[in-house]
Image (spheres, rainbow, N blue to C red):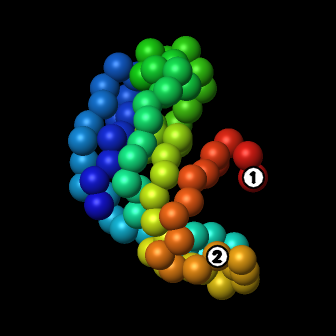
């Protein structure tokens, strides 16, 4: 799958990364639209702590492709949006 990655402060890449498998309590979402926000800009400029490489674009919407164990209330094909800053 494709990802915009922060490789180091000031260095971005558009990379192919391995498609993850959802673990317990997780969903695999095929991202259809994604925003780059102020947090991503701060990461790029080293103004916010991070441990590169980091995949950017945490504001997204997409379709559930796979459901991990111990997940209820969701189904494959469901359209969702998420905020991974809230767990």
Residue highlighted by disc 1 = 87
Q: Is residue 76 above or below residue 35?
A: below
Tag in front: 2 or 1: 2
* Front residue (pair 43, 39): 39
The local crowd at label 1, few if under 14, some if 14 to 19, many if 20 or more residues have their Cα within 10 Å, is few
Q: Horizontally, is 24 left or right of 19 in the view?
A: right
Q: Quadrant of residue 44?
A: top left
Left or right of 7: which side holds 80? Answer: right
**Percent of width and height locating residue 46:** 49, 18
Q: Position of residue 49 (x, y in %)?
A: 60, 26
- Contact between marks 2 and 1 (CB within 8 A): the answer is no
Q: Position of residue 67 (x, y in %)?
A: 57, 79
What is the number of the mark on residue 24? none
Residue at position x 53%, y 71% from top? 78
Upstream in sequence: badge 2 or badge 1 = 2
- On the image, the x and y values in percent for residue 79 come to 51, 64
Tell me: residue 71, above or below residue 84: below
Q: CA distance from mark 2 to mark 1?
A: 17 Å
Label 2 CA crowd tier, 10 Å (few <14, some 14–19, many 20+): few
In this rendering, does residue 29 appear at all? Answer: no
| Residue identified by numbered label 2 | 74
Q: Quadrant of residue 4?
A: top left
What residue sits 42% from the left and 42% below the top? 34
């Amino acid at each position: 799958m494709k990802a915009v990655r922060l490789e180091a402060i000031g260095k971005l890449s558009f990379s192919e990364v391995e498609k993850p498998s959802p673990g317990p309590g997780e969903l695999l979402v095929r991202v259809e639209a994604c925003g780059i926000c102020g947090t991503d800009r701060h990461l790029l400029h080293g103004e916010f702590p991070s441990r590169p490489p980091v995949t950017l674009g945490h504001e997204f919407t997409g379709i559930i492709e796979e459901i991990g164990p111990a997940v209820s209330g969701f189904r494959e094909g469901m359209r969702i949006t998420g905020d991974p800053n809230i767990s």
